[in-house]
Amino acid sequence: MGSLLRSEEMTLCQLFLQSEAAYTCVSELGELGLVQFRDLNPDFNAFQRKFVNEIRRCEEMERKLRFLEKEIKKDGIPMLDTGDNPDAPAPREMIDLEATFEKLENEMKEVNANSEALKKNYLELTELKHILRKTQTFFEEAMHDPYLGEETVGLLGEEAQQRGRGLRLGFVAGVILREKLPAFERMLWRACRGNVFLRQAEIDKPMEDPVSGDQVLKSVFIIFFQGDQLKSRVRKICEGFRATLYPCPETPSERREMSLGVMTRIEDLNTVLGQTGDHRHRVLVAAAKNIKVWFIKVRKIKAIYHTLNMFNLDVTQKCLIAECWCPCADLDRIQQALQRGTERSGSSVPSILNRMSTKQEPPTYNRNNKLTKGFQNLVDAYGVASYREINPAPFTIITFPFLFAVMFGDMGHGLIMFLFALWMVVREKQLQAKKIDNEIWTTFFGGRYIILLMGAFSMYTGFIYNDIFSKSLNLFGCQWHATKHEYTEAVLNHGKLFQLNPNGSYYGSPYPLGLDPIWSVAVNKIAFTNSLKMKTSIILGVSQMFFGVSLSLLNHRYFKNPLNIFCEFIPQVIFLFCMFGYLCILVFHKWVNYTSAEAGTAPSLLIGAINMFLFHYPVPKDGQIGVSDGQKGFQGFLVVVAVLCVPWMLFAKPFLLRYQQRYGQKRRKFDVLLGDINGESEVAYASPHARYTETDIQFKHQHLSVNSGDLVNHSDPEAEVTHHNDVGGTHHVEEEEEKVFDFPEVMINQSIHTIEYCLGCISHTASYLRLWALSLAHAQLSEVLWTMVMRIGLGFSGFVAPFAIVIIFAFWACLTVVILVLMEGLSAFLHALRLHWVEFQSKFYKGEGYMFQPFSFEDILDHGGEEK
C-alpha cells in the first residue's frame, strides 16, 4: 500500500537561495507542491517583514480586479475560463500588470461617472417632460372646473377676492417618490393649515435611479399657494421629503415651447447614453477574457511574497535562508525545481538544499488518489495520524462501506445509491467544471466514491438478506414445504396465523446463498432474523476489534517498542479472546452442531456467558442441554486468565520502566565518564564512513532514557549519522530538554489506558449490536412503507386502478428516497463512522500528528487565494 499504510518519510531541509533567484525558486516549488515551509520569523508581525510593500501592491491589484469583476457581473458578461494555469509572472511584470489594472480602473470609473451624470440628466429631463404634460392637464381642468371658484374663494378668502382680482396664486411643481406622497400631503395640510391646494398624478412607467440603478415609481405634483411665507414653507417641506422641484412656465405657449426643447435634449441624451454603454461594454468584454488569468497571476505573486516573508536574510543581505519539510522520496524533484528556478532567474550561483536532523515530529503526508481521498478525510476528521503510524484509511475502504451495508442492506435502496454515485463519477469532470458552491452538493460530490462503494456493498448484503424494497426474490427455489397433515384446508380456512415449523416443514439442503424467501411471509420472521443478525453483529464486531489490536503490533514493532508488545499487546489479545473470542466460538459451535430438531434444547449463549463469569451452572430444565464438566473447567480457566491480564496490563509496564530508568541512568553516567577518560568528548570518533560528534553521542544515550511514560522511539541509526550532500552541508541537531521520568504520572496514565481497554472491550462489543438494530429498523420501516402506501395502490381495480397506482407509486417513491435512502442512509453512515472512530481505531490509532500542508499554488487557487 506504500505511503497509504504509513505516511511518507519526511525530512527537514534547509534552503540557501540567492536574493535574485529566491522568487523564481519559490515559484517552481509552488507549482510542484511538495514543500512545507516553516516560519523563521514568528516574532515579527506582518508589517515588520521584508516584502510587506510587495504584498500591499498585490492586495491593491486584487482590489482593482474585484472592482472589474463586479462591473462585469453587473452587466451580465460571461467571464472566459479556459482552465489555463499560467506561471507566476516575474517581479518586473508586476509594473505592467499594475499599469494595466490602473488604466482599466480609471477608464471604468470615468465611464461610470459620465454614465451616472448622463443618466441623472436624462432623469431630470424625463421628469420635467412629465411635469409639463401633467401641469398642462391640471390647468386645462381648472379652467373648465365649475367648482374652481369655490376652491379659490376658500383659499384666498372673500375679502381678498373683493379687493381685486389682480391677486394671482403662486405654484410650484415637482416630482416625488410615490410611497412618500401620502405623508407629504398630510405634512402640507398641517404645516400650511389648509391654505394650499395640491394636485398630483402618477407617472405610469418606473424610472431608473442613476445611483443605485433600481426602478422606482414617482408621481408629479403641483402646489398652489398665496404669499411668500407659504412659498418658503412649501419649499422647505419639499426639500425635507426629497422632492425634486422644476421650473414650470405659467402660460401654455411657454410650456409647449419648453416641452419641445426638452424632447430634443432627451433624444440627444439617448444617443450619447447608447454610445457610452457600447464603450463600457467593449471595455468589460475585453477585460472578461483575461480576468481569470489575471486573478491567478496576482494570487501566485502574493503567495510567493507571503512565503518569502517566512525566510531569513543572512548577514550579507544577499542570501535567503529557509527551512522546510519535504518527502524524502521527492528530494530529487525538489532539487530539479530549484535548478529550474535558478536558471529562470539568470543567477550563476546554484541554490542549496541541505538535509537537517531534528527531534521535532515531522508532519504526516499520505499520498491519495480520487478513491482513497474521501476515506482519508474520514480518518483525518477524527485525528491526523502520528508520523509513520499505521493509517486506518486503507482498511476503512473495505470495512466502512461493509459495516454501513450491514445496517442498510437492501438491494433496491442500495441500487438507488449506487446509480446516483455512478452518475457523479461518470460526469466527474463536467460537474467539477461547474464549480457548484452549495455545501450539501459539495459534501455529496466529495464523497462520491464512498457512496459508490456503500451502494455496491448494500446491494450485496441486500442479496444476502434477500431483501429488495421489503420483498424477497426466489432465485434458488424454496426448501420449505407445507405438509397436508399439519396445514389442512380446515386449519388454513380458520384464519389464524401459524408459524413455520422447521421440524415438520423443512426438506432438502440449506438455501444456497442468503435467506430462504419463505421467511418473508412467515410470522416468526423477526424472531429468526433477529437471532441471526445479532450473532453476526457480535462476530463482526469482535473480528474487527481483534484486527485493530493486531494492527497495534505493527506499530510497536515499527517503533521498536518491545515493552509495549509484552506488556500491552499480548495481554490485550488474551483478555479479548477469553472474554468474547470464546463467545464467537460458541456461536459457530451452536450453528454447526445443533440441527433444527435440537434447536429448542440448545443452550442459550447469553445465559451461558453470564453463568461463565459467575461460576454458576444451574441444573438444566425442560430438556435443555447443560454444560459438561470439561467445558466448565475450561470456561473457569478463561475467566481466571482474563482477570490476571488486568494487573498484567496495569503494573508490568510502569515498574519495568522505572527499573529501566534507574539502571539506564547509571549506565549513561558510566559511558560519559569512559568518554572523558579516552579524551573523546570534544572530538569525533574516527570512522571510515561517518563522524559521531558529542551531540550524536548524547542523542544516542537519550534512546536509553524514558519520557512520557513510554520507551523512547529507537530510530534508524542512520538518522543519527551526520549526512553530507553535494555541497558539503551537514545536519543541524536541535536541542531539547530531556523530560524527567515521573513514576506516579506513568502509573496514572497506564491505569487510565487499562481501565479504558477493559471496559471498552465490553461496551464496544455491545456497541456493535447497532449493526443488528439498524438493520432490523431499516427492514421494518421498508415493510411498513410498502404495506401502508404501495399496497393501497395495488388494491384498486377497474378504470381507476392505473391512475391510482401512478399517483401512489410516485408518493411511495418520494418517501422511499427521502426517508429510507437519505435519512436512513445518513443514520447508517453516522453509526458506521462511530464504529470506526471509537471501536476500531481506538485499539491502535493515536491520531496525534499534524497535517503536511505544502506550499502549493493549486491549493491556494482552490481556496480563493487566501493565505493561511
Image: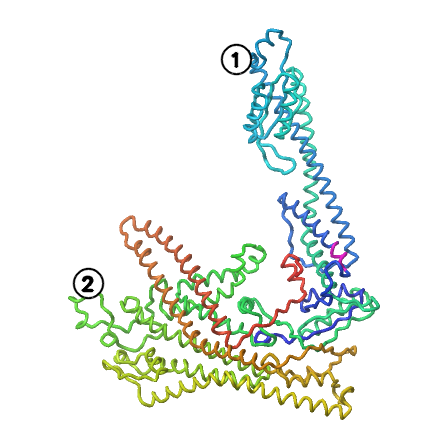
Q: Callout 2: helix, strand or loop? A: loop
Q: Earlier in the sequence, mark 1 or mark 2?
A: 1
Q: Total of numbered circles in the picture?
A: 2
- Magenta-span inclusion, residue 298: no
Q: Which amino acid does label 1 sit on?
A: Tyr
Q: Mark 1 points at which residue?
A: 147
Residue at 73% in and 55% down: 58
Residue 740 visible? The answer is yes
Residue 104, given in percent of the width and then of the height, sits at: 73, 46
Quadrant in which residue 263 is drawn? top right
Q: In this view, does 476 lie to the left or right of 249?
A: left
Residue 413, given in percent of the width and then of the height, sits at: 41, 62
Quadrant in which residue 35 is drawn? bottom right
Nearer-the-camera pick, 708 or 52: 708
Nearer-the-camera pick, 713 or 798: 713
Residue 857, given in percent of the width and then of the height, sits at: 67, 62
Q: Distance between the residues labelled 1 and 2?
A: 94 Å
Q: Mark 2 points at which residue?
A: 495
Q: In this view, does 729 lie above or below 861?
A: below
